[in-house]
Amino acid sequence: DQQVKQNSPSLSVQEGRISILNCDYTNSMFDYFLWYKKYPAEGPTFLISISSIKDKNEDGRFTVFLNKSAKHLSLHIVPSQPGDSAVYFCAAKGSNTGKLIFGQGTTLQVKP
Amino acid sequence: DTGVSQDPRHKITKRGQNVTFRCDPISEHNRLYWYRQTLGQGPEFLTYFQNEAQLEKSRLLSDRFSAERPKGSFSTLEIQRTEQGDSAMYLCASGGSFYNEQFFGPGTRLTVL
């Protein structure tokens, strides 16, 4: 039972363009969502998060959008840089638990 | 600013042996989490502590797995009688009880032969 899904295993974009990573969830009890970036042989690094009471959160080049009715969130990276090449995970959390539930990840490649 | 540290970074063991991993959280964080990640998957929650109390355990945490955080600081994760299916990256994260973000360490890569 995959409660958080990232349906695109990989994404390739040109440097300077926008990267859009998508994530869908099934549990309406989730109230907080996070994005992490992971390089090989390292632990996930926190990028940006959003509460379910908001529909957008922005931090520099990174913006997360939340569409609760569609149970969908997306991460926009503008402009994309080669150093952004990594695996990106979305994660969700309910209010009565400490655990994060992760998607399978999307590998982003930014070409120079 | 010291991040989350994990030791060892790599562990190779034979099936049936016991292994123990250590995690040192960010010092001001009172919550500590353990996750497991296999190839091509996202991290899967195992258990978490608030101070020394173990508040939640996943069904993934079989009887062969035990975690402790005796003084509310570092934590250990022990796997008894390891099986080849235990081969994975074991990740530790820490956070606070008043915010949702969790900050991960570099992980311990376990290989069971």
Image (tube, coloured by chain):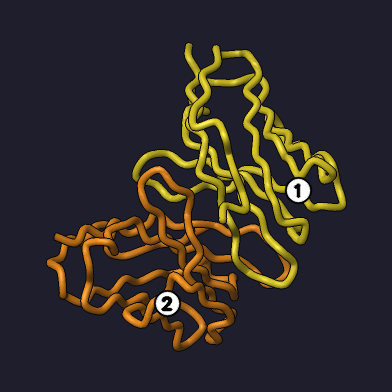
Chain colours: A yellow, B orange
Please rate how many residues cluster around mark 1, counting C-alpha atoms within 10 Å: few if below 14, some from 14 to 19, many from 20: many
Q: Chain of mark 2?
A: B
B4 relative position to B51: left or right? left
Outermost residue, right direction?
Answer: A53
- The type of residue carrying mark 1 is Ile
State which quarter of the image contains the C terminus of chain B. bottom left
- The type of residue carrying mark 2 is Ser
Question: Residue A34 appears at what percent x and percent y?
Answer: 66, 49
Indicate which disc residue B75 carries.
Answer: 2
Say if mark 2 contacts mark 1, CB within 8 Å.
no
Circle 1 sits on which residue?
A: A50
Closer-to-camera residue (B93/B29): B93
Q: Is residue B38 above or below residue A108?
A: below
In front: label 2 or label 1: 1
Q: Is residue B55 above or below residue A72?
A: below
Indicate which disc residue A23 carries.
Answer: none
Closer-to-camera residue (B15/A19): B15
Q: Residue at x 38, y 77 (%)?
A: B62
B80 relative position to B26: left or right? left
Q: Residue at x 53, y 23 (%)?
A: A11
Tell me which corner region of the image, top left, top right, bottom left or bottom right, holds residue B13: bottom left
Question: Residue B68 appears at what percent x and percent y?
Answer: 42, 83
Question: Residue B90 appears at what percent x and percent y?
Answer: 37, 61
* Secondary structure state at the residue bearing disc 1: strand
Q: Residue at x 27, y 63 (%)?
A: B8
Q: Is residue A31 above or below residue A79?
A: below
Tell me which corner region of the image, top left, top right, bottom left or bottom right, holds residue B79: bottom left
Q: Is residue B77 above or below residue B88?
A: below
